[in-house]
Image (cartoon, rainbow, N blue to C red):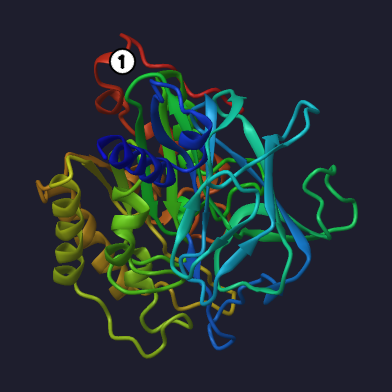
Amino acid sequence: MASHKTSIAALGLALVLGGDALAGAPENPGHWITSWYAAPQPGWGSGFALPMNVPAALDRQSVRERLRVSVGGQRIRVVLSNRYGQAPLRIGGVRVGLAEGGRPALPLTFSGQAAVSIPPGAAVTSDALALAVPPLARLEVTSYLPAPTPVTSFHWGAQQTIAIEAGDTRAAPAAVQAWRIGARLFTAAVLVETAGPGRTVVTLGDSITDGNGSTPDADRRWPDALAARLAPYGIGVANAGISGARLLRDGMGRSALARFEQDVLAQPGVTDVIVLLGINDIGWPGSPFAPAEAPVTLEELAAGYRQLAASAHVRGVRVTAATLPPFEGALEGTPYAGHYSPAKEGLRVRLNDWIRGAGIFDAVVDFDALLRDPAHPRRLRADYDSGDHLHPGDAGYRAMAVAIDIAPLVGAAAPAALPALATGD
């Protein structure tokens, strides 16, 4: 009887662990951390100011996505998300490989199976795949959708192009004829195995963190540049930025307070979060994005920040808060004008003063002081401005990453002189 109970317990453990356990996992499985991330967003209707720019549904098509990891490893796992799906998400199979080098992509399995069905609101993590991935390497993930699949959970924009190809192209080179769009669909995270306890820094923000204004498909967001600085220390960076994100209310995604657990605290290996949020809370009310919404107050924003800090600290996660860059003239001359006003500027200045002096954060990085024009401090410096007076360009994002003091992040591993960020990174 004892041996029978033992075998049942062993089978239960194998089912929990998935294919690795059934195949005979190594005695020392190592440690897993998030090396890349794209925060899922719910879809929205045609009445919103911006279109989703993704197909309403996919059917017998493949989605080919490219992404750049932060830290590398000898084994990886891929996380697929149906967080805001309204029906099960059927994936016929997934292959992943290095985007450069000419080596064939390898098939992923999920509890030993190639196909997987993801329930609404859920995510699945693949079995470990033996694939040597260097730091800052680009991966290509191709997923096949064998049946009609509504797109109700996705990641908007991201300054990244994906290809939607007819049929099952998992084992084929990228198709010449493909529908190319700027978005992320079902790939939410890449985890890598580290030899010792690894660490991940999560960047939580809006379109400035998601990289709007940077060169598309070039990985020049400020979290990408930060990843290049931290990769030599084996510290990962997970970008949880969402365009249109807000601290207190839902925008083009759930509010930071609503998604903090899933997008930040649940990331394997997370030890630090850098928060840059609030400009949409300030700018959206009275604009085409939220024309009937009442202005937010400093007290409301401060309470939201306090809650994020408290939630992080009880989990042992350090919090770095960033001041909000200037935004005079933001989106002027576009259908979205109204994002800026003198009253909104006054609130931004008061919030920044509060962030600098609140005393509840482990560190503060002053992006406002870094990015503002010394001769016109309500505006971005011209050489850091992408042109819309709201989002930095490549040079501005690089400067943001350099401004972050990484010594507390790397701890005892910090050398006497920290490495500079190379010009091309």
Q: Position of residue 304 (x, y in %)?
A: 20, 64
| Residue 115 picture location, percent across and down | 64, 54
Viewed as shown, does residue 160 lie left or right of 76?
Answer: right
The answer to whether residue 49 is left or right of residue 164 is left
Question: Residue 252 or 390: which is nearer the viewer?
Answer: 252
Q: Quadrant of residue 220?
A: top right
Looking at the image, which residue is at 35% across and 27% down? 198
Q: Residue at x 17, y 53 (%)?
A: 311
What's the residue type where badge 1 is placed? Ala
On the image, numbered disc 1 is attached to which residue? 414
Q: Residue furthest left?
A: 359
- Above or below, comparing residue 293 to residue 5 in the picture: below
**The C terminus: image quadrant:** top right
Q: Locate residue 70, reporting x and y percent.
A: 50, 32
* Residue at image location 38% in from the left, 72% down from the top: 283
For this view, does 277 lie left or right of residue 318? right
Q: Could you say whether the residue bearing mark 1 is in a helix, strand or loop?
A: loop
In the image, residue 418 above or below residue 359: above
Q: Quadrant of residue 172?
A: top right
| Residue located farthest toward the front when viewing the structure as drawn | 1
Q: Nearer the viewer, residue 159 or 57?
A: 57
User: Which residue reaches farthest right?
Assistant: 176
Question: 76 or 90: which is nearer to us?
Answer: 90
Q: Position of residue 126 (x, y in %)?
A: 53, 44
The reply, left or right, for residue 297 in relation to residue 273 is: left
How dense is the environment of label 1, judged by Cα within 10 Å: few (below 14), some, or many (20 and up)?
some
